[in-house]
Amino acid sequence: MNGAVTIGKGRKIGTVVVCVLAQLLIAIDLTVLHLVLPSLSEQLHPSTTELLWIADAYGFALAGLLITMGNIGDRVGRKKLLLIGASLFGVASVITAYAPTAELLIAARALLGIAAATLMPSTLSIVRNVFTGKERAAVIGVSSGLTILGFGMGPLVGGVLLEHFWWGSVFLVNVPVVIVMVLAGALILPESKNPVSHRIDVLSVLLSLVGMVGIVYTIKEVAYQGWGHWDVAVAAVLGPGCLLAFVLRQPRLAEPLMDLRLFAQRAFSATVGTTILAMFAQLAVSLMFAQYLQLVAGWSPLESGLAGLPGMGGAILGGVLAPPAIKAFGRAATIALGCALSAVGFALYSSIGVTIVYTDLLAAMIVFGVGLALILTVATDTVLGVVPKARAGAASAISETATELGGALGIAVLGSVLGALYRSELVIPAGVPPEAISDTLGGAVQAAAQLPPEQGALVLASAKSAFVDGLQVTMLCSAGLMAVLAVSALFSLRGVPKVLEDPEETSPATPVPVS
């Protein structure tokens, strides 16, 4: 079942629909939580620590188990793992929606993360085994654009539901989607797996789990509270230490959890590196502009979500344009073009002011969306296309892990840069006690509401101005990073064929050829 999977056109379309539904489910779930935290806090009364775990448990479980789940899919079957994961996602969504305590909610969010870790590599590896060459690139282009649309739909769906129902409804809405996925997937999806499989090395699983969670935890906590805490120090030692032990262990295993030989291929390693750096810059945008639109412009979550729709349209357009761009210019030039467009988008974003002019944001959103979709589409197709089908799950997991790691780094580092710039630019108005001003824009907004109207207005004006100044500099730094990445992609990905034919399995010492 590691050879080409031949199915009819109708089943191929159905396969794309099921895989896109799974990716949309994950994308929407990743973006709705911040909308429900206020009402959730009012009902469950979580402590500050519990609130952080409610927000982070999903991401920790997802990041820690992606590599393991990709390998499990290669061994037991990608269709089987996707159906199990989707069912688990539905059950966990119900538990999350009706969780009566913060402790149960944290456990349910972790369960959702485990389920998401089964879905992400399964969908990509199924696509890898069903579609080849230009057809695969077109499918990945469409699915990438729609997945980015899912990130924009999250605030929209959450905003509409929260206006009419309780906070749990944003998770309960997953259930009908899961039911459709499971029923359709059982009938439509073809099964595929690596015919030569061995037992999974449990120690490697533990090392990868502790290593990834440790690194992501360190990145997030350093951004939140700095280095001066024992838990951050422990995670900073355990994370890299366990990952180093994991990497050293893999070459000694007959069937490694992560095949390090994949990185010997320039096309694979350069694309994974490009994905990390691209997501480093890209993921910070959603976080920063959610604050800008809601706290500076004063828009509701629903209005902010609607405002971002043109950018999602740009992403769909970029996904559709990626295959013909590969055919016309090649993979290196297409990724470089995507990076260049993203750089232009960041530069346009840097011109925003305290007084929002929505028309000024339209061009930035559309250009940025097209660029992001071009990068992700070509990068995903390249990572999948240069590995044998039998290793599709493992390769998909590495690609998704790169995306998660890059996003976490971007939010932490660029978020910290924005915070530092905000604090340096913040001017405390005369007559306002310094302790009334928070280190964050959100805190300043809350503090201003507690002050006399005249002082509150001064605090709010100062905080908004400082935030926008910091945002402008951060956007310019991101534009510079993407411009450098555009040049780097031209060299690191040169020579990668426009059409990636299916490589054959090779001996342990031989890297999989690119062309």
Image (tube, helix red, strand yellow):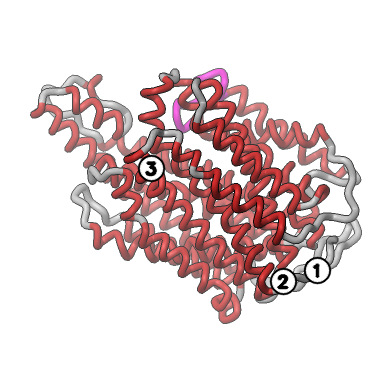
The one nearer the camera, 54 or 180, is: 180
| Contact (Cβ within 8 Å) of mark 3 with mark 2 | no
* Of the image marks 3 and 1, the number of the one nearer the N terminus: 1
Check disc 3 and give the amino acid type. Leu
Identify the residue at image location x=41%, y=19%. 45
Estimate the x, y position of residue 92 in percent, counting from the top left.
Answer: 59, 35
Q: Is 3 part of what is drawn in magenta? A: no
Q: Which residue is mark 1?
A: 4
Amino acid type indicated by mark 2: Thr
Residue in view at x 53 percent, y 41 percent: 408
Name the residue at 74% across, 42% down: 68
Which SS does the magenta portion mostly show?
helix
The alpha-carbon separation of the residues under discs 1 and 2 comes to 9 Å
Would you place residue 130 above or below residue 60 in this image? Answer: below
Whether 132 is drawn above or below 255: the answer is below
Q: Are marks 1 and 2 in contact (CB under 8 Å)?
A: yes
Q: Secondary structure at mark 1?
A: loop
Q: Which residue is mark 3?
A: 161
Number of callouts in the render?
Answer: 3
Of callouts 1 and 2, the N-terminal one? 1
Q: Give the residues drawn in magenta, as a range.
A: 222-232
For label 3, the SS is helix
